[in-house]
Every structure is written in structure tokens, then in C-alpha cells.
Amino acid sequence: MRYEAGRGLKHVSFFVDRGERVAVLGRNGSGKSTLAKIIAGLLKPDTGTVETFGTVGIVFQNPESQIIASIVEDDVAFAPENQGLSPEEIQSLVDTALSATGMSRKRNAPVSALSGGEKQRTAIAGVLAARVDCLVLDEATAMIDPQGRSEIWETVKRLHADGMTVIQITHQIEALDDVDRVVVLSEGAVAWEGTTAEFFDSLETLGFDVPDMTPRASTVVDGNMKFKVDGLSYSFDGVNKVLEGVNAEIFAGQWLSILGRTGAGKSTLVQHLNALYKIQEGRIDFDGDKLPQSGREVYRLRKRVGLVFQNPEDQFFSATVREELEFAPMNAGLSGEELNEAVMYGLDCVGLSVEFLDRNPLKLSGGEQRLTAIASILSARPEVIILDEPLAGLDSFYQRKLLEILSKLRDEGRTVITITHNLNMATRYSDRTLTLTDGKIHAKGTSSGHYVHRNSFVHRLDPRAKLFSLFLIMTAIFPSKTLFGVGIWAMLLIFLVGLSKIPLRSLMKSSRPLMFLVLFTFIFNMLFTGIYPAIFTSLRLIVIMMFALMMPLTTSPLELSDGLCQLLRPLERFDFPVDEISMMVGMSLRFIPMLTEQTDKIRRAQLSRGARLDEGGIFRRVKAFMPILIPLMLMIFRRADEIALAMEARGYKGGKGRTRRKPLTWKMSDTIILLTSAVMAVIFIFTGL
């Protein structure tokens, strides 16, 4: 394989022999990810050539941006389906890929219930099912806990032993144990190339940190306890506890590192410390007093306790770096010269120049974004700074810079709390560690709007029957004019929810983002038509929404796109892009939970910096929501681009020639449901119920 030049790369040339395992390292912005996409055929080089000896598959850094289906087995089947293979061949490839990655027992699991490591192994299985000769891993373990990373590297080790060529883009030196050769990129060019042994001999010369696992001498505790957590438990769904009986002591002026597997509840714990999550069970004391949960005391708390989220882009909602840094001190009441001094203080703390102030934070490099996110918290001069995975995805230069910043903050007397998977940081730099054990790990539950996998009568219905029935039900409910008629449909809805085996709370949780529409409808009708019409119209709208939500909850996105494709197939004679439109509709369902989650992240980012989003009337709250719209739209475009890239990487080129592992089959039950829906619709329409 040979490559010379491309976007973000000046002149790169190196070879990878068949069956070799090569690691590509370099600083953020050195062009590593660009190189990975060019090797995988997702980008074309501006100049130069790429020669491959076979097919190439790629696995990206973020598991969420490359999973296409809602069920593990369906996602793994996506690539061979695009190759037009028979159902039997597809199933054989899926079985082999799941076995090779150790995911066979999870084949029917919803992707939303997997850990980070399991999601990445699912992504690798999806690539293997395409029968690739070369596997490219683009920072595939950067966002995963140590055990998850270990599982990934064990999988890669087995694949390499079986003869697969592996190219891994990585920042993690510990992942080089079984690598044959190392290539180091710098400013878009190859700066060094050699064996793994030669690389470790040249670590310091090449500018890489030598891991130092010698524990730091702990700071003497003076008895001043900043936080005391006693018996803290928390559940998102009222059933599964993310935290259970957590006890912790956090001392002023110390650096505490919180360790634990992905999903152990680390982020949930620290977001309790500045009241982003309300205490359900247990108690938290801050400076000897009970942690406030509401009112103005909460805003005073958030001024003293700053929180930096794991992904910087999740907390950016302003057009410039200056506006990001101004947000927290403005909410604290600063203005004029005091506000400017706060901004400059935040910049100075992280070592950024004033030239960054007018730049768009979303267009900065990964390391610059992390520094900007920290500066946006420090500009309010908090006493406690909490950072969620501050080193994730950063090269050694920015890791070293961040460790220096955090060490300086601790030495100045700040309390530093970090969630980390980086054992070097936890043992060498922090004063104490707190580990959330496997015994406290519980599933967070299904996210709002996600497909809920169940072996139910409703799930087994053909998606075409469900789509037709939904259309008929909508047609009957819209003109309904009586509470009795709406009540009958509501009882039918409850009956279907029972048949589907979906917890009612999942349906209610999925409807939350739409309740703003219900509220607006109620207020509008109350003002212009009266209280009774407002109540009736709102109830009718709720029933309609609940029926509509049953579709994504009981039908996977791929099933939905297949069903819609079959229904629209007659339009192909008019050159209507049936396959493309159907796939877009199916994939759009994935954006419903993404939008909900991203809205919540931005809202929490604003609250953590002192925004008062839960004060005032409806119009003030709507006004406060408006700044969220722009970053939400940017997220949609970014995620759409990522998913499109993932689909392209797995061979999707439109629906032509694409087969299905499970072709749609119309059953007697589908006919019965469709006829029942049609009869009920006719009765309601003609009786005026």
C-alpha cells in the first residue's frame, strides 16, 4: 500500500505488507484520521496514489457515529446486504463475524444497551462481515475504558494472528505491544518509521511521554472536607439503578480521580455535585451544609463548582470563543471591564492567546477545543473544577499540557475532580482515587425514541402492515369530535402497548420532547376557542402522537425503511428515488433520540455555567431555548455526515442490488390487523365519533 499526499497531508509515503500490523501515531492535527479515510477509500488524495492488495474496512473513534441498525445482528448484516448476497450467505458471514469478535451472545441485544467496548466490537464485526482484507482502526479505543480497550485489542490480536492486515491510528502507546511497525506523522508528513522496539527506544527523542506509574505522594488532608456523599442512589427509569449506595469523601485542595468501567455511573455521580441531577436517595453535603437542590442557592453552587463535559462540542453553543468564555461570568453578574478580565483570566489559565477569541470553537482542533471548554469554566473562577475524561482522544502534547494545567490549579488550592480511564494520570498526578465497582453498574435504560427489542406480536408484524394501519388510524382520529371516540382509541392504544411488551414509561419518556407541541396547542386553543376545545384537542393530539411513537419503538429503522421501500416501489416508474428516500426515513429515526440527548447535554452545559433556564414563565423559557437551536442544527449535520460516511464505508451505494438477511414476509396476522384497522377507521369516520 502506497500513499503520497492528500487533504491535510503534505507528502506521505509508506508501505504495509500483507498480514502486517502497523501503528500510525502523531499529534492532533497531524493528518492521521485523514490518512485513515484515504486508505479506506472514503477520501480521494489531491495528488499521489493509493494501492491496495484487497478490500479495506474502517472503524472510527466514536461508536455512536458508525452503528447503523438498532440490533447487533442487523447492524453486522448491513455490509453483506449491500453486496447483494443471499440470506443464507449473509447469515453465515454474520455468524462468523460475531464469533470472531466475541459478540455472539449479544446478537439480539439492542445497541443502546451495549457498553462502549461492545459497541466497538460490533463495529469491527460489521467490517469483518464485509470480508475485508485490511482493517483500519481510527482511534477506535480512545473513548473506551481500560477493560473495553483490552477486549478490543485482544480481538485485533486474534484477527492479526489469523492473517489480517491491521493499520491502527492511535494515541495510546500501551496499544503497541503486538505491533510489527510504527509510523509517526508530524505536520502532514512521515517524521519517523521503524520497529516497535526502536520506537520505544526513541520515545523521548520523538516527543512522546514515557509512562510513569509511580504513585504520587498524597497531599496531607487537613480535615477540610469539600464534599461528603452518603448512600447516594439514582435511577433514570425508576427501576434500574445507575448509582446504588455510593459513599465518598472529597477534600478541599486535593485532586481526586474517579475510575470505573463505562456505564458505572461516574458521570452521573459528578453531575450530582453541582445539582444537575437531583438527589433521589441519600445525601450530599458541601462545605458542611446540605447540597442545595433548587432555588438561587443552586446558582451560587454552580458558580463555585464548575463542570467540563467529556466531549467539548457537547457544551459549545456560542459563535465565538469569547462568547463561550463570557457565558459563565455574565450569569454571575459581571459586565464591562470585569467581564473582559474574567475572559482573559480563563484564557491565561489554559495558555491560549487572544487570537482565539474571535474563532469558532467548533472549528478548533481537538486539543484546542478541550482547552477552550476548560477556560469557559475557569473564567468564573470556581473553587471546584470537575472534568469528565479530560485526556480522551488527545495526543501526548495536549495530554501533558492539560496535566500541567490541572496540577497548577490543584497547587493553587482548587479542588480538582477528574473522571478518567487513564491510569497514569490517576496514579501519578492525582492525590486520591475513587473506583465505582462492577457491583454498582446497571443499565441506564433505553434512550428516548429508541427501538425497544421485544419478541412480541406487535414487533413481529410486517412493517408494511404497521405503516398502513397507522395511516388508517390517523385518518380516523384526526376528524374525531367526541371524547368518547378519543377514549376508545386511547384504550386501543393501551391494549397495543400491552401486546408490544413495551413498558408504558418508555412510551411516556419518548413523548417528552413532543409535549411542548401539546402545551402550545392547549394554550392556543384555550385563548381562541375555550377551555373544553383546548382540553379535547390536546388529548386527541396526545393519542395521535402515542400511536405514531409506537412505530419507532416496535420497528427497527432498517425494518421501517424496508417496509416503506416496498410500499413506494410503484413510484420507481416515475424515477422517484424510492430506495434512497426509504433509507433516509429509516435513518432519521436515529436522530430522534440524538436530538433529545444533545438538547439535554447543551441544556446541562448552560445550567452548569449559571444559566437560569428553569426560572420565569413559558415565554422566558422559550427564549432561553433559542440559543440551543443553532448547535442542535450543527449536530444534526455533523451526525448525518458521520452516519453517511459509515454507510459508505460499509458498501452502501443506494438500494439497487441490496438484499436482506430477513426478507419481509406478509402473514395472516398482518392481514387481520390491516382489515381491523380499516373497519374501525370506516366506522369512526362515518359515525362521527
Image (cartoon, grey):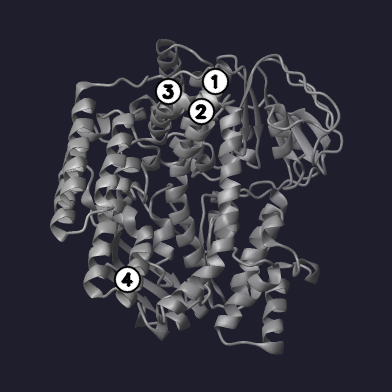
Vertical placement of residue 469 versus 483, above or below: above
Q: Earlier in the sequence, mark 3 or mark 2?
A: 3
Q: Name the secondary structure under disc 3.
A: helix
Q: Name the secondary structure under disc 4.
A: helix
Q: Nearer the viewer, mark 3 or mark 4?
A: 4
Q: Alpha carbon of mark 4 to alpha carbon of mark 1: how far?
A: 48 Å
Q: Nearer the viewer, mark 4 or mark 1?
A: 4
**Tag 4: Cα neighbours inside 10 Å, few (<14), some, or many (≥20)?**
some
> Which residue: 47% across, 43% down?
588
Q: Earlier in the sequence, mark 2 or mark 1?
A: 2
Q: Amino acid at mark 1?
A: Lys
Q: Alpha carbon of mark 3 to alpha carbon of mark 4: how far?
A: 54 Å
Query: Which label sits on residue 579?
Result: 2
Q: Quick one: 582 or 346, which is closer to the camera?
A: 582
Residue contact at pointers 3 and 4, CB within 8 angstroms: no
Residue picked out by circle 3:
98
Residue picked out by circle 4:
525
Q: Amino acid at mark 4?
A: Asn
**Total numbered badges shown on the rendered structure:** 4
Q: Alpha carbon of mark 3 to alpha carbon of mark 1: how far?
A: 26 Å
Q: Earlier in the sequence, mark 4 or mark 2?
A: 4
Q: Quick one: 517 or 620, which is closer to the camera?
A: 517
Q: Residue furthest front?
A: 686
Left or right: residue 326 versus residue 422 is right
**Tag 3: Cα neighbours inside 10 Å, few (<14), some, or many (≥20)?**
many
Q: Earlier in the sequence, mark 4 or mark 1?
A: 4
Residue contact at pointers 3 and 1, CB within 8 angstroms: no
Vertical placement of residue 242 versus 283, above or below: above
Residue picked out by circle 1:
656
> Which residue: 39% across, 26% down?
73
Q: Position of residue 232 (x, y in %)?
A: 30, 65
Q: Amino acid at mark 2?
A: Asp
